[in-house]
Image (tube, rainbow, N blue to C red):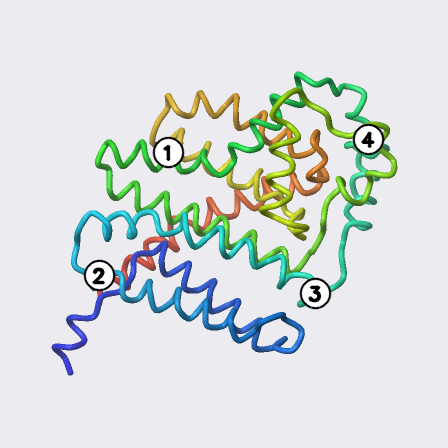
Amino acid sequence: MNNKLTEMKIPRPADLVTIGYQIFIIIAICFHFFAVPNPGFLLLYHLVIIAFLLWLPYAKTNKVIRWLRTFNPLIIIPTNFDELHYLVHNLNPVDFDELLIRIDYAIFGVHPTIWLEQFSNPILVEYLQIVYATFYFLPVILVVILCRRKEQENVNFFVYIIVLGFYISYATYFLVPAIGPRFTLDHLQINPVTGLWATQSIIDTLNFLESIQRDAFPSGHTEMTILTMIFAWKFSRKYFWVLSIIGTSLIFSTVFLRYHYVIDVIAGALLAYIVYLISEPLYQRLKSLSNKA
């Protein structure tokens, strides 16, 4: 018995957070079993992810396994995001857009997305839409920089930050479902978002990949961009200075392109701060589980 315990291998902190989120979704589905489409398939899907991550520390190390240990969130996070389309509204059918609109209006005295329309021009829209589409690549680039430097501990920690940030934001979508101003305030806009060459293709691609997601509050784009900028400052100053332009533009684009209310951006920034505060002590606690195993 003791020998078996000493041979037990605990997944790394990022994978433990991923497992925790899968368990959260499994419990949510079980409590709303008949409200969710294909609940049996979704439960199996999450159990497979858990089994895979529990198996991964035992797998014989090779190039593929090393890649999976570092980059499995590139596969798992997008699929977890995609299923939110089928889960959030079925688990919490009350949208909070009206409340978010009222909060924005109370702060600014206008609807920010409508007020910003006066500054719209095709060149600015094109730039901001391209920047907005870089969102998923920005944290990955920092991981690649750290991998090339062979800074494995920093790689592990920042991948954990990515996973923690995404899954906390996903969980909040169930509490405050909202589809965003591009759907709720479109009847008040005078003109559609119009760029030059790439804008419409990017919009069509995002709409195809995401469908109608209730993911406006908080702004995950804001949260994850700020977290990436914070840790770029810590790990790669050169990359930080690039992000200072791209990241700031991306956060601005979330409102200018009508994806988010301003209160979503504020909440996303606050969430980034909370993740930053809790990340280090939680990481050390999760690491200690592996050390004790």
Q: Is residue 133 left or right of residue 34?
A: left
Q: Is residue 163 left or right of residue 188?
A: left
Quarter of the image where the N terminus is located: bottom left
Q: CA distance from mark 4 to mark 2?
A: 54 Å
- Which quarter of the picture shows residue 219? top right
Q: Position of residue 271 (x, y in %)?
A: 56, 46
Q: Position of residue 146 (x, y in %)?
A: 29, 34
* Mark 2: amino acid: Asn
Q: CA distance from mark 1 to mark 2?
A: 27 Å
- Which quarter of the picture shows residue 170? bottom right
* Name of the residue lying farthest toward the left: 3
Local SS, label 1: helix
Disc on the earlier residue, 4 or 1 = 4
Q: Label for residue 92?
A: 3
Q: Label for residue 114?
A: 4
The image shows residue 126, relative to residue 29, as above or below, that is above
- Tell me what residue is drawn at x 66 percent, y 60 percent: 175
Q: Which residue is mark 2?
A: 291
